[in-house]
């Protein structure tokens, strides 16, 4: 512990030096050098005006490819509504679909054509009007070159007139409105290879400065068509966890991300904010016997391929104990990749029952040996659980899993690995993953069979589950698709939950924690997706100093 806090003290010096090095960019953008009075007559934080804020995120939140939707801005691991660009739709707090640029949306009976009407009063920040041609250009561009999102379901986008765009689909895709919520519209007249570093949009903010590896400064778009922007200037600084904590301790940040490991600390003038998420952690259990794949890599696992083993593990893990011991209580038990979502099937929920877990193993022929570890037909009840070597939380969850499963007579070894080998090795060895998005496609991407006859991230296949998910995508509208997504999880006979195939074990949904100045009012947050980053500033324009 002593070494940990020495590291934090060193990080404090480094973080303050960084913030100081950023110079006047982190100073109040207007007024004199004294602290400015906020709306209630109290003093705003030192160096900050009443309408600006400094937010600290992790270094992985910095968009390496810049602010181009074609290269992941607004999508990928850190799904959010882009600050710089406008989107056609948005997700509401209850994760239903609302409108941004769109004013109306219709889909044909066969689901092959989406017709979207857009506002006629929107301009890009260079003064040019935003029209349906820009929308069509954006979607045709991301279809061609996107390196993050899959747009194979889209055939083409066509501008019918200045305010109407049609999306002609290559296949029915009922959840298209969720895709429209993360694709920022770019200007056809000002798009080029350097767009990501010099973005022009029509959204709430303009990117004014990007000091790579350090900070990004956004200023309010004075011509924004939506609700009045209250927070006029947003500075996002990128720091490691220790440095972020130190920056808050030094009063150099207004809102700084943090981890549960710091939740028992106190910072004068700050409060700890906690936001629920569907940012889940869990591990796959290869559902086929050990063998060799087409590329020569190991595939399958003779122990975890027994469905009774997978069922025993699912009810033999105490998720609440993990929340208490690993997350200091900041989280919720996870039972699926889509907990709390409109398409979630509550049949996924199970009760912790170690005695029943042991009984299942016994009945399936897994008997305890002299060393307490079970065995069946010469196969030892054991597996190696991988975790990303750089992720201390997943390491702790892996260690907790190891300890709990030993009580069931299952031997688990744990190993930290890099992502360069993790994906391949997960085909034969369980891996501690992190998932969670505001779209049912997360369910599809994890469980649906590919052309090679297996799911992508772990060997598993179920034709009935595939059929339900295909029917969900082909549904006539978004709401009617939810029933099929729920049936894919469990239809009363088969599925991916406890009484079904259970090829993945979900453990916890991680609350996203932030140190916030006590007089900063962060607007109400919707359920955060995977990625402890940009989601927090989805509505930063409505934050206020009190």
Image (tube, rainbow, N blue to C red):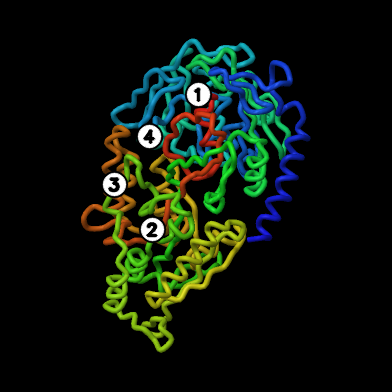
Residue 206 visible in the current orientation: no
Q: Position of residue 350 (x, y in %)?
A: 29, 58
Q: Does dot 3 land on a helix, a strand or a loop?
A: helix
What residue is shown with label 3?
Answer: 486
Count the labels in the image. 4
Mark 2 or mark 3, whichever is nearer to me: 2
Label 1 near label 3: C-beta < 8 Å?
Answer: no
What residue is shown with label 2?
Answer: 320
Q: Nearer the viewer, residue 517 or 371?
A: 517
What residue is shown with label 4?
Answer: 95
Q: For marks 4 and 2, give the CA distance.
A: 26 Å
Label 1 near label 4: C-beta < 8 Å?
Answer: no
Residue 342 visible in the current orientation: yes
Residue at 54 percent across and 15 percent down: it is: 224
Residue at 35 percent across and 54 percent down: it is: 335
What residue is shown with label 1?
Answer: 542
Mark 3 or mark 1, whichever is nearer to me: 1
């Amino acid at each position: 512990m002593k070494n940990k806090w020495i590291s934090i003290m060193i990080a404090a010096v480094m973080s303050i030096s960084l913030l100081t090095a950023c110079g006047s960019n982190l100073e109040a953008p207007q007024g004199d050098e004294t602290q400015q009075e906020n709306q209630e007559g109290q003093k705003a934080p030192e160096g900050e005006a009443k309408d600006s804020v400094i937010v600290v995120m992790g270094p992985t939140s910095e968009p390496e490819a810049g602010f181009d939707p074609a290269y992941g801005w607004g999508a990928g691991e850190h799904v959010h509504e882009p600050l710089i660009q406008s989107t056609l739709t948005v997700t509401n707090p209850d994760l239903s679909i609302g409108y941004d640029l769109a004013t109306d949306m219709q889909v044909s009976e066969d689901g092959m054509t989406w017709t979207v009407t857009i506002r006629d009063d929107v301009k890009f920040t260079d003064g040019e009007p935003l029209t349906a041609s820009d929308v069509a250009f954006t979607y045709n561009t991301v279809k061609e070159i996107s390196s993050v999102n899959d747009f194979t379901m889209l055939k083409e986008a066509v501008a019918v007139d200045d305010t109407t765009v049609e999306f002609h689909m290559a296949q029915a895709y009922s959840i298209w409105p969720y895709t429209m919520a993360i694709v920022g519209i770019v200007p056809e007249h000002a798009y080029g290879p350097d767009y990501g570093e010099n973005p022009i949009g029509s959204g709430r903010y303009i990117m004014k400065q990007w000091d790579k590896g350090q900070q990004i400064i956004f200023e309010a778009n004075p011509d924004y068509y939506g609700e009045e922007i209250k927070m006029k200037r947003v500075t996002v600084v990128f720091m490691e966890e220790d440095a972020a904590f130190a920056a808050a301790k030094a009063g150099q940040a207004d809102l700084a991300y943090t981890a549960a490991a710091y939740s028992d600390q106190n910072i004068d003038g700050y409060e700890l904010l906690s936001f629920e998420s569907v940012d889940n952690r869990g591990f796959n259990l290869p559902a086929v016997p050990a063998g060799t794949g087409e590329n020569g890599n190991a595939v399958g696992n003779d122990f975890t391929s027994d469905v009774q083993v997978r069922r025993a593990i699912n009810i033999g893990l105490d998720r609440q104990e993990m929340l208490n011991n690993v997350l200091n209580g900041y989280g919720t038990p996870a039972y699926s990749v889509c907990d709390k979502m409109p398409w979630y099937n509550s049949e996924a929920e199970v009760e912790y029952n170690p005695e029943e877990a042991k009984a299942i193993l016994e009945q399936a022929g897994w008997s305890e040996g002299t060393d307490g570890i079970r065995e069946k037909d010469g196969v030892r009840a054991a597996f190696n659980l991988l975790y990303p070597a750089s992720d201390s939380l997943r390491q702790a969850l892996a260690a907790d899993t190891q300890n709990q499963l030993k009580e069931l007579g299952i031997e688990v070894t744990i190993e930290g690995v890099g992502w360069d080998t993790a994906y391949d090795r997960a085909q034969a060895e369980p891996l501690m993953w992190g998932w969670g998005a505001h779209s049912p496609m997360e369910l599809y991407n994890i469980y649906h069979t590919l052309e090679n006859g297996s799911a992508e991230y772990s060997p598993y296949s179920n034709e009935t589950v595939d059929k339900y998910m295909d029917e969900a995508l082909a549904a006539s509208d978004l709401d009617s698709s939810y029933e099929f997504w729920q049936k894919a999880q469990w239809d009363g006979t088969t599925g991916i939950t406890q009484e079904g195939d259970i090829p993945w074990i979900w453990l916890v949904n991680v609350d996203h924690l932030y140190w916030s100045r006590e007089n900063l009012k962060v607007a109400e947050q919707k359920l955060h997706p995977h990625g402890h980053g940009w989601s927090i500033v989805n509505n930063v324009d409505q934050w206020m100093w009190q």
